[in-house]
Amino acid sequence: MARLITLLMQAAVVAVGALTGVSVAAGHGPLTIDAQGSFFVGGHDVKSDVLSTIPNFAPEGTISVDQVYVHYQIPSGSRKAIPLVLVHGCCLTAKSWETTPDGRMGWDEFFLREGHPVYLIDQAWRGRSGGSPVPINEVKIGNARPDTLPAYISAGRESAWEIFRFGPKYPTAFPNMAFPLQAQSEFWKQMVPDWSYSMGTPNPTVPALSELARKIGRAVIISHSQSGIYPFQTAEMDPTGIAGIVSIEPGSCPRPDVDMRPLKGIPTLILFGDFVQLSTAWTRRLDDCKAFVKAASAAGVPVELVQLPDVGIHGNSHMMMLDSNSLVVAGWLNRWIANKVGS
């Protein structure tokens, strides 16, 4: 029995390697890096006299807001693959790209093993990117009306189940859906409160991404869901440093009448998973993205829209970077980057 299990595991590794074109990542070989660290981009100072309503802490002072936390790793070796910036979606943090809920390799490690410097960010006011207590404290001490409180949401698992296309209604799953539901309790712990819907347009993460792209020099921005529109807004602000855009199941695509000039010369991929036709909301978003792609292509932008089932990859939820076939998707994406963006 032990021998059979070993052979099956070896076969699985070979199968993943064949599909992804990557043997090192599939085999979990030794991983060495030249550098790792963290820093912040963006942000500005705010002075306030309502930083605290607790007697132990002074209410007056200066804080930084709208900054974005960046964690990076640069792999060892002679390969000079293009850097990747990974941007998470709604109600989540950079954890989206790390170890999967069931303990498998995340995309951060996969792409690092492929030779890419990898930069993970926490969106502004999320995770390790601090926010401000001022708008809440203004209401608490009576300086502002309660209806001025900013929108502050959490996504319950019941509604997230449908948004993430795990199934038609919680807790029923779509047949052959690839998300590891046996580890869903671990996934739900990743969900965090989200201030984004009170932060205006563009989200402060966008200018921070622009600063990061200029700092790196040449990078592919990979966004997901809520942040799907961010790389396009970043390019509109300043395309410097953006070598490519990968927008994974964007919550919205640019309008077809947007100024396409900043996107010319930037290879762009909009990627959707499976079961889209079973969700009215995602069908509408897909149609909107198709309209953008048609207009952008006519304007000379090197853009394409791909649905994974059309390239032989099936079962993917909205959280494709965590699905059981996540490395297959990552391998396909890695080849797209190599072919369309280069090194």
Image (cartoon, rainbow, N blue to C red):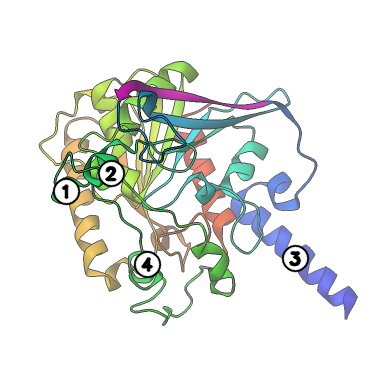
Which callout, 1 or 2, points to the residue nearer the camera?
2
For label 4, count other residues whose C-alpha is less than 10 Å away and answer few (under 14), some (14-19) or many (20+): few
Locate residue 238 relative to residue 98 in the image: left or right: left
Q: Which mark is residue 136?
A: 2
- Residue kind at label 4, given as amino acid type: Gly
Of the residues tagged 3 and 2, which is closer to the observer? Answer: 2
> Few, some or many C-alpha atoms within 10 Å of disc 3 (few <14, some 14-19, many ≥20)?
few
For marks 4 and 2, give the one nearer the viewer. Answer: 2
Comes first in the chain, label 4 or label 3: 3
Give the residue drawn at x 73%, y 45%.
Answer: 24
Q: Is residue 44 magenta?
A: yes
At x 31%, y 66%, the residue is: 276
The residue positioned 20% from the left and 40% from the top of the image is 254
Dot label at residue 11: 3
* Nearer the camera: disc 4 or disc 3: 4
**Which segment did they paint magenta?**
36-48
Residue 258 vs residue 99: left or right? left
Secondary structure category for the residue under label 2: helix
On the picture, is 167 further left or further right than 329? Answer: left
Mark number displayed over residue 156: 4
Residue 253 visible somewhere in the drawing: no
Q: Secondary structure at mark 4?
A: loop
Secondary structure at badge 1 equals helix
The circle drawn on residue 291 is 1
Residue depth check, mark 4 versus mark 1: number of the one nearer the observer: 4
* Quarter of the figure with residue 236: top left
**What type is the residue that disc 2 sits on?**
Ile
